[in-house]
Amino acid sequence: MTVHILVRSSGKRGWMLRCDLCEHRFDAAVAGRREAVAFARTNGWIVGEATWCPMCAATHTIRRTA
Ligand SMILES: [Zn+2]
């Protein structure tokens, strides 16, 4: 399965993720994209088929379990 992840180089050093549902962004000052994804996940982001910030992820989880 191909996973499209909205992780791109932020121009300086590091990577940037953008939430699919809102304007939230996450900057990870790490060398690799994999590390950026891992770093974002430890901060509550969901990165996979979709990219969600912690707040959107929480909303989605509530909807799913309700
Ligand atoms: Zn969001």
Image (spheres, rainbow, N blue to C red):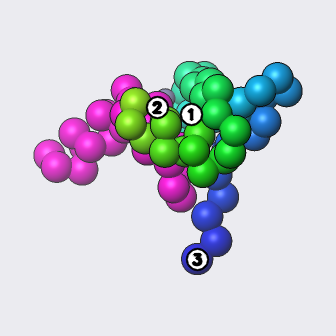
Q: Is residue 46 left or right of residue 21?
A: left
Quarter-wise, where is residue 41 in the image?
A: top left
Cα distance between the residues tagged 2 and 3: 22 Å
Amino acid beneath label 1? Cys
Is 2 magenta? The answer is no
Q: Is residue 52 magenta?
A: yes
Tell me where residue 64 appears, x and y as whole percent.
24, 50
State the separation of the CA atoms marked 1 and 2. 5 Å
* Residue nearest the viewer, comparing 16 with 59: 16
Check the image and report above or below for 1 versus 24: below
**In the image, residue 45 lies at what x, y percent?**
43, 37
Disc 3 designates what residue? 1
Which dot marks residue 45? none
Q: Earlier in the sequence, mark 1 or mark 2?
A: 1
Which residue is label 2 attached to? 53
- Left/right placement of residue 12 relative to residue 66 reads right
Q: Position of residue 25 (x, y in %)?
A: 60, 24
**Residue nearer the viewer, 6 or 56:** 6
Residue placed at 40% from the left, 30% from the top?
Answer: 43
Q: Which residue is mark 1?
A: 19
Q: Quadrant of residue 61?
A: top left
The local secondary structure at tag 3 comes to loop
Q: Up-down: is 38 above or below 17?
A: below
Residue at screen point 38% across, 37% down = 42
Under 8 Å from ligand 1: the CB of mark 2?
yes
